[in-house]
Each structure stands twice: as structure tokens, then as C-alpha cells.
Image (cartoon, rainbow, N blue to C red):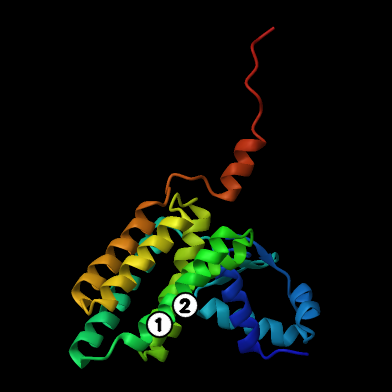
């Protein structure tokens, strides 16, 4: 069944969240057209949509590629996430929104995270850990912000892939659990503090000194140092 350009773009973003698409990976128009059963024109429109959202770039005479965010771009995405996610919890406190229904959904999500961590499906594990934050926004009734947050989370996921994050999946799941426990206790201030600490831990785990793919290739192909004679 053919897909719309929006569905194609969404599939690309979900693949980024699942760490199935790596920073710097080439996205061939014909390959995507064959995969989704659509025309190259529709694929190009989807890629242009993704370019506007900051996920892909076109390189002259080479085609489309998943972006490789700079350290500054990664820091900016994490900062934006802090503003959006803290604001979501602040709005819940102002509205006096009941938390029981949303914590049930989040508990179910965490159970899925734990099952994925125990299993061997790395893509599902990565997607669920990233999607927790989108699930939190949706549970709070912020559908528009959940779309914004999905994009921001995908950008930080690319940064984590590119800069080889040392943040363990089990640690993320434990921190998600602590956030939900604070929500269950009705302590939105504590939930906010734990949420911001969690985002900070993920950001701090990045290794910005990690060489990019082209740098690694150059290093790999550099001449061997040999003793004279």
C-alpha cells in the first residue's frame, strides 16, 4: 500500500528514534520510492518536509542524508526539551489535572520498556525509551506539543548516536520510573526536578570529542607510522 508524504516522513522520524537510521546515512530517493511503493516525486516532497524539520540535508550532486548535528545543535535541542517538558508539568500543576489516568498509561509504557531491555530488540528498546517523553506529553493532553517533542527527542537521539552516549538503557528506564512515582504521589515539583535531572544525565553522557564518521574514515585510511629503514 502506498504512503503519503507525511507518513513517509513520520516513518523516517520513528526510525531515527529507534536508532535504525544513523547520522550521516544516505537516503536514496529511488530506494525509498521502491520501499514505500510511491513515486520519487512523493519521496522528494517527504524529504523536503524532513529537511524543513531539521532531520535531513541535501548534498550537492550526492543526494539526501540524515543530518549529523553539531555539539551546539545537540545542546540546543536538549535545552529546548527542558523548556517544553518542564512547561508541560508546570501546566498540569496550574490546571490541577488528575494524574491517576496518565500514570497508568506511563506505567504500562515503562513495563514495555523493561520487556524490551530484557529482550534482544535494540530498535524497540531505543524507540520506547525515547517515546516515553512523547507519551508523557500526550497523556497530559498536549497533542501539539507532543509533535514538537517527538522532533526534539529525535534530534537528541541523533546526537546520542553520533556522540556515542554512555547513558545506559536501564538507567533511563529507572529514571522514567522515578518520574512516574513522583507523579503518582501527586508531587509535580519533584516529578519536574527528576525529569530535568534525567534529561541532564542523557546530555552529560554524550562524548562530544567522538570523531565524526568522515574523521574516523580519514583516521582509518591514514598511513601507518613506520620506522625508517
Find residue 37 and report its image quarter. Answer: bottom right
The residue at the far top in this view is 229
Q: Position of residue 19 (x, y in %)?
A: 58, 63
Q: Nearer the viewer, residue 75 or 51?
A: 75
Q: Secondary structure at mark 1?
A: helix
Q: Nearer the viewer, residue 11 or 226?
A: 11
Q: Which residue is painted at 41% across and 56% down in the image?
A: 171
Q: Tell me if residue 210 comes above or below residue 49 in the rendering.
A: above
Tell me the tag on residue 108. 2
Q: Which residue is painted at 21% across and 70% down in the image?
A: 190
The residue that mark 1 highlights is 104
Q: Which residue is painted at 52% across and 71% down in the image?
A: 112
Q: Nearer the viewer, residue 138 or 162?
A: 138
Q: Position of residue 162 (x, y in %)?
A: 52, 55
Q: Position of residue 177 (x, y in %)?
A: 37, 67
Residue 148 visible, this orientation = no
Left or right side of 119 for 195:
left
Q: How many marks?
A: 2
Quick one: label 1, few (<14), some, or many (20+) residues within 10 Å?
Answer: some
Quick one: label 2, few (<14), some, or many (20+) residues within 10 Å?
Answer: few
Left or right side of 35 for 167:
left
Task: Give the Cα separation between the discs numbered 2 and 1.
Answer: 6 Å
Q: Position of residue 69 (x, y in %)?
A: 48, 61
Residue 176 visible, this orientation = yes
Whether residues under marks 2 and 1 lie with C-beta atoms below 8 angstroms apart, the answer is: yes
Locate the C terminus and report the quarter of the image it occupies.
top right
Q: Secondary structure at mark 2?
A: helix
Find residue 73 and report its image quarter. Answer: bottom left
Amino acid at each position: 500500500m502506498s504512503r503519503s508524504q507525511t507518513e513517509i516522513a513520520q516513518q523516517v522520524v520513528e526510525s531515527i528514534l529507534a536508532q535504525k537510521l544513523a547520522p550521516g546515512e544516505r537516503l536514496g530517493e529511488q530506494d525509498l520510492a521502491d520501499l514505500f511503493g510511491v513515486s520519487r516525486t512523493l519521496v522528494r516532497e517527504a524529504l523536503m518536509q524532513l529537511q524543513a524539520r531539521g532531520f535531513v540535508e541535501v548534498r550537492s550532486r550526492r543526494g539526501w542524508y540524515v543530518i549529523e548535528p553539531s555539539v551546539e545543535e545537540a545542546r540546543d535541542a536538549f535545552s529546548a526539551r527542558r523548556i517544553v517538558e518542564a512547561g508541560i508539568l508546570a501546566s498540569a500543576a496550574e490546571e490541577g489535572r488528575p494524574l491517576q489516568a496518565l500514570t497508568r498509561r506511563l506505567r504500562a509504557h515503562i513495563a514495555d520498556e523493561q520487556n524490551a531491555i530484557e529482550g534482544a530488540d535494540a530498535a524497540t528498546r531505543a524507540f520506547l525509551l525515547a517515546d516515553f517523553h512523547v507519551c508523557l506529553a500526550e497523556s497530559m493532553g498536549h497533542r501539539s506539543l507532543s509533535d514538537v517533542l517527538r522532533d526534539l527527542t529525535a534530534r537528541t537521539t541523533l546526537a546520542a548516536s553520533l556522540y556515542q552516549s554512555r547513558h545506559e538503557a536501564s538507567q533511563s528506564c529507572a529514571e522514567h520510573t522515578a518520574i512516574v512515582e513522583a507523579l503518582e504521589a501527586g508531587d509535580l515539583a519533584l516529578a519536574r526536578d527528576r525529569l530535568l535531572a534525567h534529561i541532564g544525565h542523557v546530555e552529560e553522557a554524550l562524548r562530544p570529542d567522538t570523531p565524526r564518521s568522515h574523521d574516523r574514515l580519514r583516521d582509518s585510511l591514514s598511513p601507518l607510522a613506520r620506522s625508517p629503514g
